[in-house]
Amino acid sequence: MTTPEHYDTISIGSGEAGKYICWNRSATLAVKTAVIEHKWIGGSCPNTACLPSKNFLYSAEVVHNTQKYAATGLLKWSGSGVDMGAVRERKRDMVNGLVEMHESVFRGSGSELILGHGRFVDKKTVEVVLKDGGKRLLTADNIIISTGSRAKVADTPGLNESNPLTHIEALELDQVPSHLVILGGGYVGLEFAQAFRRFGAAVSVIDRGGRILKNEDEDVSEALVEILQKEGIEFLTSTTVSRVSGTSGQSVTLSGTRNGQPFEITGSHLLVASGRLPNTEDSGLEAAGIELTATGHIKVNEYLQTNTPSIFAVGDCAGSPHFTHVAFDDFRIVSNFLLNKQPLRSTLNRQVPSTLYTSPELAHVGLTEDAARKAGIDYRSAKLPMDSFLRSRTMDATQGFAKVLVSSDDDSILGFTALGPHAGELLPVVQLAMSANLPYTSIANLIITHPTMNEGLVTLFRSV
């Protein structure tokens, strides 16, 4: 029988929160920790998601700008097309470097990296089926579940059989699809739609909703869709797919209804980007007595503690907003809880910023106008076209706008949205003012370097 090995803390999965919790406890407290990972060292972000996709998008932007400025005579371009093999290798090189960086951090922190599949045996014990063969039994005072999520592929007849792409396979393509059909108009769908269109593919985006990005204000989603349409992307909203036939990579046909009328579209490739599912299966959660929510996520309290007090769940599998920066905050919450036992941080009312990495970017924090109206919150607002952010003119990137919502009661900032170049870089200034409960005038009165994108915030906030 395998002899159990005891640790202070172990993480099942090496996603953002789990790895940082173990790194931090080993490095600062000199306690014994281990991270169990069956496939992606460092989790999905450095391997198949955030960073690889942004690498991919940047390659597409380089191609787009080369073609754009060749047309003006500023650059010379042969027009020979895109080498997708080179795009893929650039991405792979970055990923390899990130994996090496993670391995180095494991060595430096003292936290053990165990390659294999971890599964609960009971509330204190995890069995690991090792990648290279054999098994280990680990017991721990604290166990972190950091298993992430995966792309959701609906049970639409023929969809699974068509062998559709997810974001993982899309990043590995070595050819430009002649016609890419994308199921889902969310963040993943829109980013890949623009990238592949810029690489030269015809692109159609299908969404069940009446408009793209339904959680954003209508003026925001309409402006972004208009920009993407001008690049040649087709949007098919209010569309329900009831059957799929053919094979992605050859020819694939989607049938259903659009606005209640029969609908059919055929493309060369199909990308599924219609949501995520938590990775909670085959983890032995029943053996540990861990409860799930109605959506299949692990049920946690505001400190990310499961119904078994020594077990925590973090990141996507716990239903946290699906952003790496939120998972990093999950790490801070759990680390603080374990260290102090009188927690100073929780998930309640935390600030959740987001950035959609299309070009232009869409950045947001706080309330939208729609949400403020529905909640009956009295507010004032200001809106500024992106060409008034003077730095945008130097980059030929004046499409879009920024807007801010301010409380009518106390001048606090309720929400901020920007659609423009490097819009995500505008968020920290606004976030800091919001988190410190400073009035909007604290930004309006700043002296900000000219010409920077942040300089436009002064003009925007002064116009409230």
Image: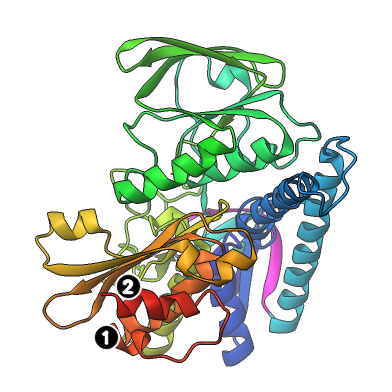
Residue 310 appears in the picture as rendered: yes
x and y, in percent, of residue 51 in the image: 66, 59
* Residues rendered magenta in the picture: 111-124
Based on the picture, tell me whether residue 100 belongs to the magenta stretch.
no
Q: Residue at x 38, y 90 (%)?
A: 340
The quarter of the picture where the C terminus appears is: bottom left
Which element type, helix, strand or loop, lies under badge 1? loop
- Asked whether 119 or 427 is in front, the reply is 427
Above or below, 332 relative to 423: below
Residue 40 appears in the picture as rendered: no
The quarter of the picture where residue 71 lies is top right
Which element type, helix, strand or loop, lies under badge 2? loop
Q: Residue at x 48, y 73 (%)?
A: 426
Q: Can you identify the residue that label 1 sits on?
A: 437
Q: Can you identify the residue that label 2 sits on?
A: 350
Majority SS type along the magenta span: strand
- 362 displayed left or right of 451: left
Real-space Cα separation, disc 1 to disc 2, in angstroms = 13 Å
Amino acid type shown at disc 1: Asn
- Asked whether 451 or 179 is in front, the reply is 451
The quarter of the picture where the N terminus appears is: bottom right
x and y, in percent, of residue 8 in the image: 54, 79
Amino acid type shown at disc 2: Arg
| Labels 1 and 2: the sequence-earlier one | 2
